Amino acid sequence: MNLFVKIFFWFLAAISLMIGVVVFLNWTVQTEPVVSRWRLSVKNQTEIWAETAAQIYRSEGKKGLSEFLDRVRRPENISEVDLIGENGETFMSPGVNPDDYKDLVSRAMASDTVEIESQEETALSARKVLFQNGSWYVLVVRWERPKFTPFFGESPWRYVRYSVVLLTAILLCWLLAKYLSSPIAKIREATQRLAGGDLTARVGRKLGWRRDELASLAKDFDVMAERLESLVDSQKRLTRDVSHELRSPLARMSVALEIARQKANQELIPSLNRLEAESQKLNDMISRLLTLSRLESSSEEIEKSPINLKKLLEQVASDADFEAAAKDRHVKVLNAVDTHISGNEALLQSAIENVLRNAVRYTKPGTNVEVELQNINQKARILIRDYGEGVPEAELGNLFKPFYRVGEARDRGSGGTGLGLAIAHHAIRLHKGSIWASNRGNGLDVIIELSANGKHDTAGDKAAADDGKI
């Protein structure tokens, strides 16, 4: 569950809990005082009516008492007013069954206060009355129990009010969650871009006028990104400058070696040949460094033209096979479908050559480097497979870094400079493609994917990152 959903549901739960507490408190505050006041009112009213009934009967007789009882019965909240004697007979209460009130009447006769009996919908109050003829009666009044108004009222529109409150809570929670989580998503996006090699990734400007801790984190990220970009640019510039500066001394050294060869005796010729070989290696390394520097500093757009990838691959494989034959190795194109893409032929040729030479260098003598070209989901996929010792899984993602070597099997003694795969990586990246390596058990596979339409394959980048690809 991502952070946005967590924040959203926590806010929604908090608001729901607050609404529940408010409703509960409203119900509690409304119920307790209302019931208490109602019971007190019922007792007082019943007490007054009982005394009034006795006075009216004494002064006006049955007629006056009947009129009084009729007036008492008029309010809507009173449904019944009866007089029941101590022996169970009714007085001026036609149709009333005294047995229904037997217990209540008994309690009222034994008490000097008003007795109240609650039922489901109504409540009964009872108070004994002494008439002038010496007879004791109980005045019984049936009351409608007080009804409490729901929190959102009783009208049919209350469901609309429920919906409005719910939608408002959801909208508010969504806005709050979005406000809190969106900076984190932007920082994460910028971090992924930075990890993918885009050193221009910044996030501070995307946060607007925020002045909270997340804005401070974004500023710190931008400072870090600027520092990284500066360091990487300085390193690239240093590599480029040093490489350029070394070309002139190497050129002069070659001239001096040639002059020395002409003047030297036969004993010095082997040493001079060794110096020439080492000078050539150094010159080759500098050339590769300059190529890598040029690729690293290239813009995102390169000059492209239509390319028959199958023809280019077969040509490069043929040249690599000619060189590999001298080392008891071969390069074989097992399967190649006819594929046309748009790209820079020189860069793609250089990338494929570097990968093939690396494979020829590390495959075992007597084995073949196998090459395949497939077209999968409008992507051209080149598979180059060797039968060497493979690479530790933890080191696969580092193969395409400059000067990187893995273990004793892939050191400078094997003939490599550690720049070929780095050059291939940058050349493929300039074509919006992906390159990665994976172990197969009895060798190493290097896969190159190029989009047929030249668009950058972000999904492929994500998959490459998951597999240790570059």
Image (cartoon, helix red, strand yellow):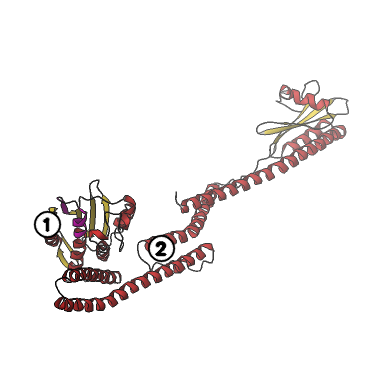
In the image, residue 213 above or below residue 84: below
Q: Is residue 105 left or right of residue 338?
A: right
Q: Position of residue 66 (x, y in %)?
A: 78, 33
Can see residue 336? no
Q: Which label lies toward us, 1 or 2?
A: 1
Amino acid identity at mark 2: Ala
Q: Is residue 250 left or right of residue 56?
A: left
In the image, residue 206 above or below residue 81: below
In the image, residue 167 above or below residue 103: below
Does the magenta-highlighted stretch encompass residue 362?
yes
Q: CA distance from mark 1 to mark 2?
A: 48 Å
Residue ID at (82%, 32%): 113
Residue ID at (53%, 47%): 159
Q: Position of residue 387 (x, y in %)?
A: 20, 50
Is the C terminus in the top left, top right, bottom left or bottom right quadrant?
bottom left
Amino acid identity at mark 1: Ala
Near-viewer residue (210 or 103):
210
Marks 1 and 2: CB-CB under 8 Å?
A: no
Q: Position of residue 40 (x, y in %)?
A: 77, 39
Identify residue for label 2: 190
Q: Position of residue 121 (x, y in %)?
A: 65, 34
Disc 1: CA contacts within 10 A as few (<14), some (14-19) or many (>=20): some
At numbered mark 2, what does the secondary structure look like: helix, strand or loop? helix
Identify residue for label 1: 325
Magenta segment boundaries in residue numbering:
357-372
Does the magenta-highlighted stretch encompass residue 119?
no
